Amino acid sequence: MILRTLRTVYGQLSQAIQGLERRVRQAVQQDEAAERLQTIPSVGLVSALTLVAAVNDIQRFTSAKRLTSYCGIVPTVRASAERQEQGPITREGRSEVRAVRRRILWRAAQIQKHARSHTLTGLSCWLAVC
């Protein structure tokens, strides 16, 4: 009885997930910026849509510096009259952008590791992993 119920619930959840994945794919296909972001190795459907949703209209940023500051992916700066030190990225800005950045960097590191172990380089490495 319990196993049958679990199978039913599993089937329903699988169908719901497949429906959501279809909707995400459709959303990416309808957004030119999200499609372009996906051409970057390690950027998938969810990462692309997250970045597009967080940034919204990129034209509102007058420089890359303002965009990175808004996203919270700039280093902390400690400065005095004599010296200036940079630390880790700030914890301010859009947390979802920082989370996507971590996922992309982690995936890129996996690709690099795979390349070293299989003596592949550049695009051939990326295609081999994907």
Image (cartoon, rainbow, N blue to C red):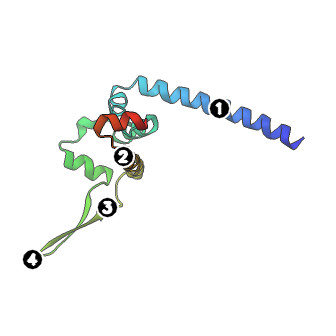
**Left or right position of 65 against 97:** left
Q: Residues within 10 Å of mark 3 (few under 14, many from 20)?
A: some
Given residues 61 and 34, the one toward you in this image is 34
Q: Where does residue 6 sit, x and y in percent of width and height?
A: 79, 40
Q: Residue at x 38, y 48 (%)?
A: 117
Q: Residues within 10 Å of mark 1 (few under 14, many from 20)?
A: few
State the image quarter where residue 63 is shown. Answer: top left
Q: Residues within 10 Å of mark 4 (few under 14, many from 20)?
A: few
In terms of sequence position, does the residue under pointer 2 or pointer 4 come before the other? Answer: 4
Q: Separation of disc 2 and disc 4 at Cα?
A: 38 Å
Residue tagged by mark 1?
16
Q: Does residue 69 lie above or below 75 as drawn?
A: above
Secondary structure of residue under mark 3: loop
Q: Where does residue 64 sit, x and y in percent of width and height?
A: 20, 45
Q: Residue at x 60, y 28 (%)?
A: 19
Residue tagged by mark 3?
90
Residue sitting at the far left: 82
In terms of sequence position, does the residue under pointer 2 or pointer 1 come before the other? Answer: 1
Nearer mark to the viewer, of 3 and 2? 2
Nearer mark to the viewer, of 2 and 4? 2
Residue tagged by mark 2?
108
